Structures are given as C-alpha cells and as structure tokens.
Image (cartoon, rainbow, N blue to C red):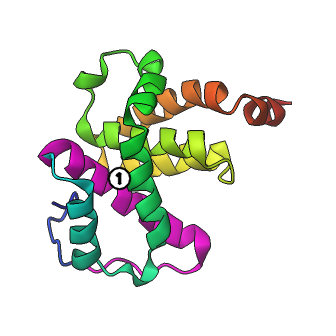
Amino acid sequence: MSLNHDDSQDAPQPKAKGKIATRRVARSLGMQALYQWHMAGQSLNEIEAQFRVDNDFSGVDGAYFHEILTGVATQKTEIDEAIAPCLDRPLEELDPVELAILRLSTWELRNRVDVPYRVVINEGIELAKVFGATDGHKFVNGVLDKLAPTLRAAEVSAHKR
C-alpha cells in the first residue's frame, strides 16, 4: 500500500546520502508503514518485511525505520494519550495520514532527544505536505507546536530565550 500521489509503486526512491537524508527517507517509509498498519490491521512484522522487499533500502536508515515501527507500536497508548489533549477533535476523527505523522513525530519527541524538537516538527510538516490533505501540514504543525513544550520542556524553553 503506497501513498504516492502518482500511484506508481515502482517509482524509485531517491538515493539518500548522509544520515539526515537516510533518516528522512526512513521517516517517509515509516509513516507510510504506520498508515498501512492503522488501515489494514496487518502485523508490523509483515508490513516491515513487505516494505523492505518493495523498496530500495540502499538509501534508507533501515535501523531507524525499524525503530520507528516498533517504537510507535509498543508505545501507541502513551503516544495517543500525549496527542489527545492537543487536538480539537477526538483522535478517532483524525485523517489516518495525519494520525500516522503525529504518532511518528510524537514517538520521536518522546524517545529521540538526539533529534532537535524543531527538526521533528519540520519533518512532520514536510510529511504532511507530501502525503496529507491540502492544509494538513498546518494542522500537524499546530498539534506538534502544542505538544513539544510538554515533551521537551527544557529544550523548548532554552530555544525561546
């Protein structure tokens, strides 16, 4: 299940170079895998295997991709509880693409302090621009802006000084 707008599943992934680029591709594929997990109810092991077969992983941080999937799956309840107070509607009413992006970004905010919170927010916005609804990136930005100070209080307050 691909979320590419051109519907060509065989479109080659851009060759990523460097840690930042390979993580960006890992996030993109991770978000798509989380979307599929939510929509199809398949096991993440099956989905991960399928993504590794169907995509060229030479330009992907494969370990980060795996970490995203297992991290979001094992912390789904805590992640959803963190997101819920920042929403203007029930979690169940969110667009599934935006939900996948928010879950991935929340997992990163909670667990990957090596990734600056502003990078997490920017990456979430970029994913929403590519895969989300027309103004989905604005919604994702608003939710993550509310969430970041609760999950990264010291980092956010240090940045605002």
Q: Is residue 4 visible?
A: no
**Residue that appears at 41% across and 39% down:** 103
**Residue that appears at 80% across and 31% down:** 160
- Residue 142, given in percent of the width and then of the height, sits at 50, 28
Tell whether 32 sits left or right of 160. Answer: left
**Which one is nearer the viewer's eye here, 74 or 114?**
74
- Residue 130, given in percent of the width and then of the height, sits at 35, 54
Residue reaching furthest right? 161
**Residue that appears at 45% across and 26% down:** 83
- Residue 31, given in percent of the width and then of the height, sits at 35, 53
Q: Amino acid at mark 1?
A: Met
Q: Quadrant of residue 99?
A: top left
> Is 90 inside the magenta-drawn segment?
no
Residue 84 drawn above or below residue 49: above
Secondary structure predominantly adopted by residues drawn in magenta = helix
Tell whether 134 sits left or right of 140. Answer: left
Residue 132 drawn above or below residue 153: below
> Is 33 inside the magenta-drawn segment?
yes
**Which one is nearer the viewer's eye here, 141 or 81?**
81
**Residue that appears at 24% across and 24% down:** 92
Q: Is residue 51 visible?
A: yes
Tell whether 10 sits left or right of 112. Answer: left
SS at mark 1 in the image: helix
**Which one is nearer the viewer's eye here, 70 or 133?**
70
- Residue 11, given in percent of the width and then of the height, sits at 23, 77
Q: Which residue is mark 1?
A: 31
Q: Which residues are magenta?
A: 11-40
